[in-house]
Image: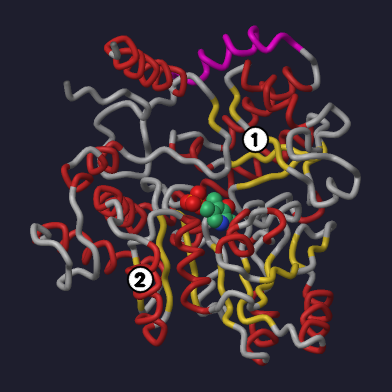
Amino acid sequence: MSREEYNRVFELLQKHHQWFGEVIPLIASENIPSPAVREALISDFGNRYAEGWPGERVYAGCIYIDEVENLCIRMMKKLFRAEFADVRPISGVVANLVIYTAFTEPGDTMMALSIPCGGHITMGKKKLGGTAGAVHGLNVEYLALDYEEMNIDVDRTKERLKKLVNKGKTPKLVMFGASVFPFPHPLKELADSFHEVGATVGYDAAHVAGLIAGGCFQDPLREGADVMSLSTHKTFFGPQHGSVVSWERYAEKIKRATFPGMVSNHHLHAVAGVAIACAELLEFGKEYATQVIRNAKALAQALYEQGFNVLAEHKGFTESHVILIDITKQGDGGTIEKELERANIIINRNLLPWDIKEGRHFMHPGGIRLGTSELTRLGMKEAEMVEIAEFIKRVVMDRESPEKVKEDVVEFRKNYQKVHYCFESVMEAYKYIKIR
Ligand SMILES: *Cc1c(COP(=O)(O)O)cnc(C)c1O
């Protein structure tokens, strides 16, 4: 007797689609892909295996799949001016594991930001269950963060590196990049110090890949990075997937780490979706990324004027899609996240760099994180950011009933239903695609 559950799944999917057409989506790691990308995702590619490199597959039936993957590789290289791209990692986590496997051995030391300082769980220590420590056996040491600047502290990081070298724990790898990533990291200032001790310089562009592709953030491969990982669905507006880009001299070891190391099937429907997103970014990336950053600055400014403690005010709050707010005067991140959700405003709670020291926990941290990629994709500009700041203020500062604010949010969203910065927007962004 499963017919009921079967029907219920479709009902829930449809409810979700309807809901998301009525919310203000502010999750910094999310985006909305174009209808074209979504069409690729329901193609038969998703039922096939390829394994291996285009032209050298383990399976037959890959004639068209190979051509799509080659197109994807060619465009990915163009977007990041890279000599080599592997578009097979099925997510950003897997892309980081590819880097760890290609450039380190278990037991080696890696440097990265800690999680409260914006680092990602993939860079976490073994005792925290992080991918680097618990899955690949790396000894993780931290890059230093300057809390005022909300960026990596160059001098203190050099000191920490020196100490590690003196202790015989010279890092084999350093990972720049983060999940809270308002300002370009000081790659140029630090890459030489790491290269001098023989470390590989990695850059995790999971969050900012779409901004880099649009030419609006830093350019890691020109600034000293040997290898870069990315998610293809955060500011990069494709389907959920990952990639690694690098230089030709590292191609063989990256390929081998991906397959047979990290993937068997590599989600060929997603590769097709990534190819479409690459084409869209080549065409519209600059305009899109410029507006994402303008929107983030405008939202930060408007919230600041409403009395919110948006961090890094003296630096203009952000140079990316993301802003971080210390919410401790208004409550805790967890509670505020829930209240805003009741008003159809979707944000996420976030640790502040000093939260652990002050005894705060991930369920109830001192911060909230907001990102503007998806709103931008829906066609919103600076004026709409001011309206959104007002909605947030009404819930968090004025303590208006979230249900009351929700009514206005739903009304506001009616004008923003199509995806922008793509070749054709044939249907509404969150419309449930029916093929039955
Ligand atoms: C999101 C994120 C990842 C993981 O990406 P997935 O595609 O979700 O697996 C890796 N690194 C950073 C810094 C991230 O923010």
Real-space CA distance between mark 1 and mark 2, rounded to the nearest whole angstrom: 32 Å
Residue at 65% x, 35% y: name it. 348
Q: Identify whether 308 is placed above or below 90.
A: above
Type of amino acid at the residue the image marks with label 1: Asn
Residue 101 badge: none
Label 2's element?
strand
Label 1's element?
strand
In the rendered image, the quadrant that contains the N terminus is: top left
Magenta span: chief secondary structure:
helix
- Judge whether residue 319 can be spotted in this image: no
Type of amino acid at the residue the image marks with label 2: Ala
Q: Nearer the viewer, residue 359 or 277?
A: 359
Residue at 63% x, 55% y: name it. 120
Task: Decide which of tag 1 and tag 2 comes sooner along the chain.
Answer: 2
Residue 348 badge: 1
Write the start and end of the magenta stretch as one range. Answer: 400-414
Q: Quadrant of residue 392?
A: top right
Q: Does the stretch in magenta take in 409?
A: yes
Residue at 72% x, 44% y: name it. 324
Query: Along the horizontal axis of the image, is 88 left or right of 174?
Result: left
Instruction: Point out residue 76 in the picture as x, y percentages from the top left corner.
Output: 34, 65
Query: Along the horizontal axis of the image, is 380 left or right of 253?
Result: right
Q: Does the stretch in magenta take in 26?
A: no
Q: Identify whether 129 is placed above or below 21.
A: below
Mark 2, residue position: 85
